[in-house]
Amino acid sequence: MDDLNGTLRELIQVQQGVLSRQQALDAGLRQDAIRARVRGGRWRQIQFGVYATFTGECSREVMMWAALLRSGVGAVLSHHSAAELDRLVRDPVPLIHVTVPASRRVEPVPGLVIHRSGRILQARHPSRLPPRTRIEETVLDLAENARTQGDAFEWLFRACGGRHTTPERIHVAMEARKKLRWRAELAGALGDTADGVHSGLEHRYLRDVERPHGLPAAIRQARVVRGRRSAYRDVLYEEYLVAVEVDGAIAHPAEDKWLQARRDNAAAAAGTITLRYSWADIVTRPCEVAAEIGAVLLGRGWPGGLRRCGPACGISQV
């Protein structure tokens, strides 16, 4: 790299060792010099017109840079690829998602999914590299392309529950979009997120168990301090010392189960009873769950009463 000028050296460093032919030409490198580097094995083409200026394996981020440069000026990583970079997802999807300006036509490229947007300048994060959409835009892109409404909600809960962004910022991004699939429903779920709902299952509990059956409003993600330790309860009916934990996982490691048990035991010693429900409980028998929780609350002084959620509700006493 010693014979390259400062502009090219800086580009190569910023772009994780990746450089496009056009960038090299614009910075003053001649076409025959590029060909010589490729023939000599110092550079290798990893996308059409895009080179790795090093030997060895290409990292995931290198391939993302190559996808961006292949897609042209103004392209940004988006959807699952932006989510991967910002740690909204644990497991990356094989394809790399890139969004380009709406006026551009990019030929199909194996391994890339090309999206087009007329508001790419607003959606682009101002400083993060590789260039990508803002987290709020990423969340809305993924929600809009989700298979189901529940999957769309999950992106909101994951982003806000993981403190990657806030409901307020997502709301601003929603308002900036003229079209948005499930707009009203997403706005409602966003309001629940602001109230402390951190997962799709917690949302199902609020929507299908607590509200329609008239249970009292609970505190969500309630911080409970025991000595020097603190824990968060999914749902806490603080006045009646009743906590509800909802769990979407099929199984937990034994260590996690013992941690849960110790937490529940400590809560019981302080007078708080903990009720635990699985995904199947919340989704397939919400009325029975409401009846069980209502009975416990009534036994602890709740002056209210359960109500039927509809004609087919399984609650027999109102």
Image: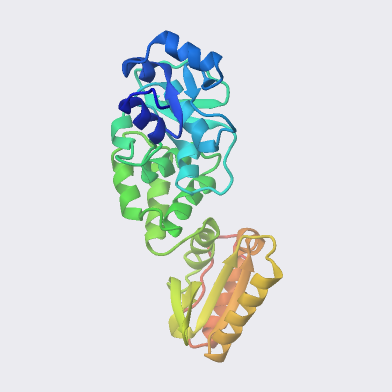
Q: Nearer the viewer, residue 104 or 270?
A: 104
- For the point 36% across and 20% down, the residue is 23
Q: Is residue 40 visible?
A: yes
Q: Which one is in front, 100 or 216?
A: 100
Q: What is the number of callouts on the image?
A: 0
- Percent of width and height locating residue 69: 43, 24
Residue 205 vertical placement versus 153 (above, below):
below
Q: Is residue 192 above or below residue 87?
A: below
Classify residue 24 by image quadrant: top left
- Where, by quadrant of the figure, is residue 28 drawn? top left
Query: Residue 235: percent from the left, percent from the top?
Result: 49, 72
Asked whether the viewer can see residue 302, the reply is: no
The structure residue drawn at horizontal position 49% and vertical position 12%, both measured from the top left corner, is 36
Front residue of 303 and 51:
51
Residue 301: image x %, image y %? 48, 88
Q: Position of residue 210 (x, y in %)?
A: 50, 67
- Kindly identify the residue that appears in the image at 47 percent across and 16 percent down: 49
Which residue, as the protein is rendered here, is positioned at the far front?
2
Is residue 40 found left or right of 221 in the rendered image?
A: right
Compared across the picture, whether 169 is left or right of 90 comes to: left
15 vs 176, nearest the viewer: 15
